[in-house]
Every structure is written in structure tokens, then in C-alpha cells.
Image (tube, rainbow, N blue to C red):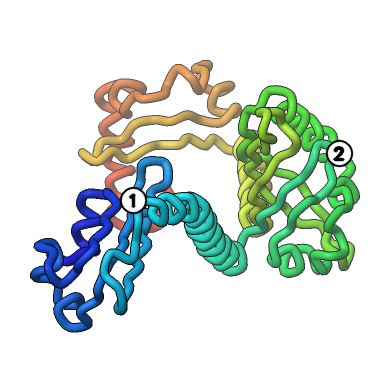
Amino acid sequence: MTVLQYIARTQESLVIANATADEICATDPYVLKHRPKSILCSPIVRQGKFIGLVYLENNLVAAAFTSERLEVVKILMGQAAIALENTRLYQTLQQSEIKFRAFVENVNDLIYSVNKDAIFTYLSPQFKDMWGYEVADYLDRSFVPLVHPEDLPKVIASNQKLLETGEKQAGLEFRTQHRDGSWFWITCNNSPIKDARGQIVGFRGIARDISDRKAAEIKLRDRELFLRSTYEGVSQGICVVEVTPSRDFRFVGWNPLLEKLTGIPSTDIVGKNPEELLGASYGATIRQNYERCLEAETTIFL
């Protein structure tokens, strides 16, 4: 065992008057090679945790280190422990900042923070990609001018709820204006920022461009409205039939014209097969027609 290993294991100070004759040093390769006369070695402990050690040696005189000198070293070690801990904390903080910056600069979404007065206190570089402005153009400015006037009330309400209750606000969707004047949709997830006393002083969040999704939703909605208007307004009877995995046919509904002709509400036919709705004989005929349609994989006219 070496002197350094002994200190690390025992966490006790060690003063050796004659290193060449001391049993602790008898197998220490360093001592055997350099043959110091006297050694003082003491652990550096911070909040009960071993974080380093101080090693002093004298190559000229035996018993060079006294108990008085050990006390001085211990005082210095207290300061050294604080300095070492601060250095480690600073290095950890630096590493965290580097990782955070790398994440922020490479993610496609905007990361931001806002104070209680709706002022941006942080904007990630994606702000320029999404809005066309430089970060400096809106840092320390209100986000309100960027929000569509029709959507501003719900944005303010969501932020106010977060600031008052501390509850996270997720899935807030609204329109925002690009520097070129165009509008695009974003969704935001916001979380509160608290000070050392636990008081809410603002919020941080992530914003994602959902313009493509919104455009698809609008297109789908318009198509559904068109189909519904056709379904309900056409002068021909239309029924919707589901084909089950077992190749049975179940009615989903029919349009108002068939309701009028049959006197049966569309809701009353849901889940029924042709025989249940139309009787065994006529239902079997209808089933055959449906089978022909499936086999042909095209429209058939009856």
C-alpha cells in the first residue's frame, strides 16, 4: 500500500518523521525510489466527502514536520476544500451549459423563456428560422405583437392560468406572424419558472411549427363538409355499409332521403346486417349484390 492509498482509505492525517524506516512506506514504490526523509500527508474532506489530499515531503531533514505545522496545513486544507469544490461545481456547470447549448442549437423547435410581463428573456437560435427575425430583434421585447389578434385572448388566458396556479400548459395552438407578414400555426408547451423563494416569475416553453398539420386538418374538414353536404342533399338514396373482418355487412347509416322513403331513422339501422334490416329474402339479395361489388373491386349498377 502506498502513502496516498493509505490516506485515501483511512482519511486520516499522517506525519512520518523517518520515511525510510516507517512500515507504511516500506512498500511504497515512490518512497523507495526517491527516499524522502520526512513526509506529511493529509486528506482534503468537504462535507464528509474525500475530494483530494495534500502531500509534503522533505528530502534533507528527518522529522521536518511537526504537529504545529500539521494544524497550519489543516487550516489551509479547509480553504483548499472549498476551492476544489467550487472548481468542480463550475466545471459541472460548464459541462451542463455546453450540453444544453448543443441541444438547443440543434433542435428544430424554438425554446424560450418569458417573464410575468410577457417579455422574452431567452430565445433559442431557431427563432430566426421560424419567424425570420434575429434573436436580438425580440429579446427583451413582448411576444404579443407576434400573436394573431383573434388568438391573443386564449394565449393570454393560458399564460395567466400558468402564472396564477403554477400548472403546466400544454398543447396551446395559435397563429403567429412571420417577418414577411405571413401567418403560421404553432403549438406551445409552457412550464413555470420559480425564484429561490418558490415564487413564479415567468415561464419557459417549447414552440413547434404545425402549419402543415393544420393545413391538412383544414383540407380534411373541407372535404368532410363537402361529402356531408352531398350525402345529405343528393336526390338519391345513399347508405353506408361496413365490411367486418368476418366479411359480414353492417349498416352504418343512410342519408335523409332514405330516411324519408323508408320511414326508418338512420340511427335505427346502425349495426344491422341486410337480413336483419330487410328480411331474409330481400336481405339475401342485397348481400349478393354487396358480394359482387367486393369481388369486382369496382362500382356496379343494379
Which secondary structure lies at badge 2?
loop
Instruction: Tell me which residue sits at (26%, 26%) in the image.
Output: 281
Looking at the picture, tell me which residue is in the foreground, 292 or 100: 100
Residue 210 seen by the camera: no
Residue 272 coordinates in the image, percent (x, y): 34, 24
Q: Earlier in the sequence, mark 2 or mark 1?
A: 1
- For label 1, the residue is 50
- For label 2, the residue is 117
Q: Is residue 83 left or right of residue 211?
A: left
Dot 1: within a 10 Å radius of its alpha carbon, few (fewer than 14), some, or many (20 or more) residues?
some
What is the residue that sits farthest to the bottom in this orientation?
A: 33
Separation (CA) of disc 2 from disc 1: 46 Å
Looking at the picture, tell me which residue is in the foreground, 148 or 157: 157
Identify the image quadrant of residue 200.
top right
- Residue type at mark 1? Phe
Residue 242 coordinates in the image, percent (x, y): 37, 37
Instruction: Tell me which residue sits at (47%, 29%) in the image.
Output: 253
Looking at the picture, tell me which residue is in the foreground, 70 or 296: 70
Residue 191 coordinates in the image, percent (x, y): 63, 38
